[in-house]
Image (cartoon, rainbow, N blue to C red):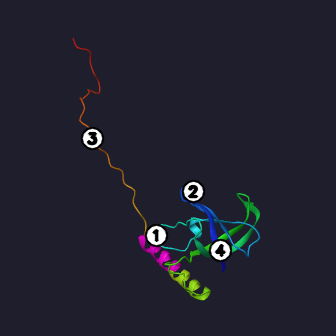
Amino acid sequence: MLDGTVKSWSKHEGWGVLVSPDVPGEVWTHFSSIVATGYRCLTEDELVRFDCEDVPTGRDGYLWRAKRVVSVDEGSEFARLTDQEIDERIKAVDRVAHLQARTRGPYLVTERVIRINSPRTDPDPSPPG
């Protein structure tokens, strides 16, 4: 894993840019690459560790894409872990997410209809007479 810093992050769009002295250029990342439970977001100047891959066609102008991004800022659960310990923690998070997805099962979409009191209309109005 590489050490880096969050250069920029758009919480509204869910992606941002990382920089590392070990990568020649900026690294694009998406919120789905962040290893965490719950809401996944990064902040500018946050210290991170990540794996990355080159993107031959580029992604929004970036030739590198981050995978498995973890925050190592002070207070982070990954701050003092080794690469091996981070890998084990990532596998544990993946197992939990996989199990949760399997136990949710099918879901039912229901529609609620609300009747509003309104004047009743006759389906076949006859002219008075």
Residue 68: % across, % down: 61, 75
Instruction: Estimate the spatial distance between the alpha carbons at disc 1 and disc 2, rounded to whole Å.
Output: 17 Å
Alpha-carbon span between mark 4 and mark 3: 58 Å
Q: Quadrant of the N terminus?
A: bottom right
Residue denoted by label 2: 13
Mark 2–mark 4 Cα distance, whole angstroms, equals 21 Å
Q: Which residue is mark 4?
A: 4
Within-10-Å neighbours for mark 1: few <14, some 14–19, many 20+: few
Give the label, 1 or 4, closer to the camera: 4
Label 4 sits on what residue type?
Gly
Residue 101 is one of the magenta-drawn residues: yes
- The residue type indicated by label 2 comes to Glu
Sequence-wise, the earlier of marks 1 and 2 is 2
Quadrant for the C terminus, please. top left
The magenta-colored residue range is 93-104
- Pair 2/3: label in front: 2
Is the residue 112 above or below the residue 10 in the image?
Answer: above
| Residue farthest toward the left in the current orientation of the protein | 129
